[in-house]
Image: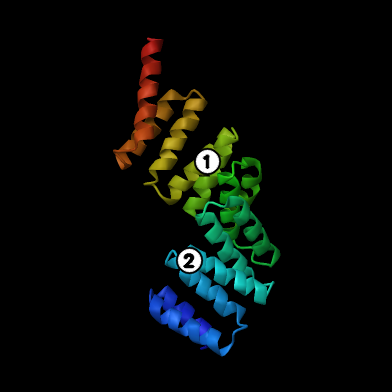
Amino acid sequence: MDKNKQAVKQMKEGNMEEAAKLLNEAIEENPNDAVAFANFGNLLLAVQDSDRALTFFNKAIELDSEQGAAYYGKGNVLFNLEDYLGAIDAYQETLNKGIKEADVYYMLGLSFYNQGDLVRALPSLHTAVELNDTDVDAQFQYGLTLAQLERIDEAISVFQHVISIDEQHADSYFNLGVAYSYKDNIDEATAMFKKALQIQPDHVLSANGLKQLENLRNQGE
């Protein structure tokens, strides 16, 4: 097993110091090893050393412009730094280099979402959930984007799917409550807010939603 593979194994097992030692050796033995630089970037990202991680990812790309993993790592650094436009560019390059995985589409969609571009976020998130139907985070984000684009029935279906995967997902129950409120289905909305509070008693948004529905009922009496 070469030192890159050994280092990745050590990282997965949480042995960061041993992984760093192996990657240092790999780079010393071959200063043009783009994979070693990308792996070192991932290690630095894992220990939240964003500035150095970005330097290593950029070096990997400089050495091998086809290094898709380095673009993905760079995207993750920029996303964490809230440079969403930079992250979008990096994730798109990742896809261009042939890494068309669910996580890449999810992060690209999330970057568009955080940039406020819901229309462009939606197709990436849709692809992410198609590629990985059981990814709760991606499914939830997809549902949230649909809801904010007022595609309510589709959003309800997605949030219900999230709950089928994770029946303790309080935020999905809350968003179902909002969606049913939007459709004037007050009884179902009330049930969803109550379910969210049953799971998470300090879910403030659900408590507020429930209070607003109670006020609506009182006004109607």
Crowd tier of the residue under label 2, counting other residues whose Cα lies within 10 Å: few below 14, some 14–19, many 20 or above: many
Is residue 133 something that shows in the picture?
no
In the figure, 7 relative to 107: above or below?
below
The quarter of the picture where residue 104 lies is: bottom right
Is residue 42 something that shows in the picture?
yes
Image location (x, y in percent) of residue 86: 62, 55
Image location (x, y in percent) of residue 178: 46, 31
Image location (x, y in percent) of residue 72: 59, 64
- Amino acid type, mark 1: Leu
Tell me the tag on residue 171. Answer: none
- Amino acid type, mark 2: Leu
Q: Which residue is mark 2?
A: 45
In the figure, 2 relative to 211: above or below?
below
The quarter of the picture where residue 18 lies is: bottom left
Q: Is residue 96 left or right of residue 196?
A: right
| Secondary structure beneath label 1 | helix
Image location (x, y in percent) of residue 87: 60, 56
Identified at 47% across, 72% down, the residue is 43
In the figure, 2 relative to 175: above or below?
below
Mark sitting earlier along the chain (2/1): 2
Give 187 or 72, whichever is nearer the viewer.
Answer: 72
Which one is closest to the eye, mark 2 or mark 1? 2
Q: Is residue 76 left or right of residue 166?
A: right
Q: Which residue is mark 1?
A: 144
The quarter of the picture where residue 204 lies is: top left
Q: Is residue 208 left or right of residue 40?
A: left
| Secondary structure beneath label 2 | helix
Crowd tier of the residue under label 1, counting other residues whose Cα lies within 10 Å: few below 14, some 14–19, many 20 or above: many
Identified at 53% across, 42% down, the residue is 143
